[in-house]
Image (cartoon, helix red, strand yellow):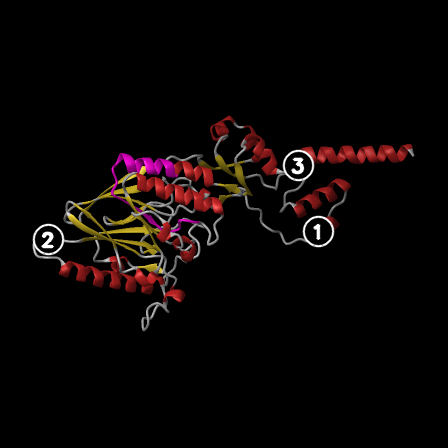
């Protein structure tokens, strides 16, 4: 059986105030064409379909259009909810969708698989929605659930019990049933993307040990935005679109997985297009504005880090004149100035001339950097002009 594993579409997410809806639509259209070209049997979307628990109407339109287009390729589709999704809102239209599209959001039915059959026999697909420990305690009476690991471990116990029963029920001589689990979590050994995979902490209590996923042939994980292989049969696909500058160097795509008759996995990476590259540029502001080496990035999303010793005037507006898609600006001086502990009054008391008072003022408000040669010349010009004007009166 051939499977395409994707996740973390985050439909409706903005990028520094800019909508990503049309860029994501184009990427998902390419993904759909890949499903058709590679004759995929099953498409898995492992959670965080929406970016918000209350998505706008246009987000539902994009999701419906994409699911219908995927189904029209001939593939079956299984979707689960993630921590960004509202399980109720994502799942409300599940019964309205056409045959072959399954939206699984109910933790009470996670041990009831979607079963597909190919020439090698059945494949049971267990969709585990995001399990918030505080919410699932009421689903499983008598089960102690304090952490993500507790929740996933118990969910997989239920999956293994159901799978064992189904395998026992098969007649002798029948092909052995294979199994796929879908989950949305931090799994042990994965590296998160800073500031992006929010709401599930990357910490000792919230990491799910890989041993929890034993007993199935392939584990399709969601939540981490970069692709990752934790074991040959345990993988993250990452998001299909870049949603932060911390992801700029991570490829976008999905896993194309072939599951043979024995349940062995062979996987290859399918690249997806990047509608607009993300780059972080670091240099003094004047260089960012004029240096020819940055010309190649004028159509990219830009995070500019200017390294001048002091804050510069109106950097975002000036940068956007060269880089229309400059989305973030930060001041990261290359030299950290030490604080001498002097107050402004103390600085001024040691000054003997107007120019020294001016220099002391600038040093106080600019982290120790006094007046430059040009600033001193301008100051003298202004003072001299004032003296001449006073003399004329």
Write the residue at 13% across / 57% down.
Answer: 170
Q: Position of residue 121 (x, y in %)?
A: 15, 49
Dot 1: few (<14), some (14–19), or many (≥20) neighbours within 10 Å?
some
> In the figure, 125 relative to 155: above or below?
above
Q: Earlier in the sequence, mark 1 or mark 2?
A: 2
Q: Earlier in the sequence, mark 3 or mark 1?
A: 1
- Say what secondary structure mark 2 lies in: loop
Dot 3: few (<14), some (14–19), or many (≥20) neighbours within 10 Å?
few
Q: Which mark is residue 174?
A: 2
| Pointer 3 residue | 372
Res 223 seen here: no
> In the depicted view, which residue is nearer to us: 289 or 252?
252
Foreground mark, 1 or 2, reads 2
Foreground mark, 2 or 3, reads 2
Side of 308 where 272 appears, left or right: left
Q: Earlier in the sequence, mark 2 or mark 3?
A: 2
């Amino acid at each position: 059986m051939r499977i395409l594993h994707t996740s973390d579409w985050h439909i409706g997410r903005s990028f520094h105030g800019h909508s990503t809806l049309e860029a994501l639509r184009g990427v998902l259209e390419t993904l759909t064409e890949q499903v058709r070209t590679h004759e995929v049997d099953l498409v898995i979307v492992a959670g965080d379909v929406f970016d918000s628990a209350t998505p706008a109407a246009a987000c539902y339109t994009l999701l419906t259009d994409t699911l219908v287009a995927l189904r029209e390729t001939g593939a079956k589709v299984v979707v689960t909810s993630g921590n960004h999704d509202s399980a109720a809102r994502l799942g409300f239209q599940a019964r309205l969708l056409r045959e072959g599209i399954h939206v699984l959001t109910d933790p009470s039915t996670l041990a009831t698989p979607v079963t597909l059959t190919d020439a090698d026999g059945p494949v049971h697909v267990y969709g585990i929605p995001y399990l918030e420990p505080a919410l699932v305690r009421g689903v499983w009476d008598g089960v102690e659930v304090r952490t993500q690991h507790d929740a996933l471990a118990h969910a997989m116990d239920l999956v293994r019990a159901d799978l064992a029963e189904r395998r026992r029920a098969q007649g002798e001589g029948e092909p052995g049933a294979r199994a796929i689990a879908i989950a949305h979590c931090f799994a042990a050994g994965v590296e998160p993307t800073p500031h992006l995979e929010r709401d599930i902490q990357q910490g000792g209590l919230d990491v799910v040990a890989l041993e929890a996923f034993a007993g199935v042939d392939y584990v399709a994980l969601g939540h981490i935005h970069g692709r990752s292989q934790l074991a040959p049969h345990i993988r993250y696909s990452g998001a299909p679109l870049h949603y932060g500058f911390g992801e700029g160097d991570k490829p976008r795509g999905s896993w194309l997985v072939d599951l043979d008759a024995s349940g062995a996995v062979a996987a290859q990476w399918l690249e997806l297009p990047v509608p607009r590259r993300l780059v972080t540029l670091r240099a003094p502001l004047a260089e960012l504005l004029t240096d020819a080496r940055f010309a190649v990035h004028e159509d990219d999303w830009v995070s500019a880090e200017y390294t001048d010793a002091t804050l510069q005037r109106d950097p975002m507006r000036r940068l956007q004149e060269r880089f229309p898609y400059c989305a973030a600006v930060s001041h990261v001086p290359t030299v950290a100035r030490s604080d001498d502990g002097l107050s402004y009054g103390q600085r001024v008391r040691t000054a003997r001339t107007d120019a020294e008072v001016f220099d002391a003022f600038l040093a106080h408000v600019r982290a120790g950097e006094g007046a430059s040669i040009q600033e001193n010349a301008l100051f003298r010009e202004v003072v001299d002009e004032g003296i001449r004007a006073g003399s004329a009166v």
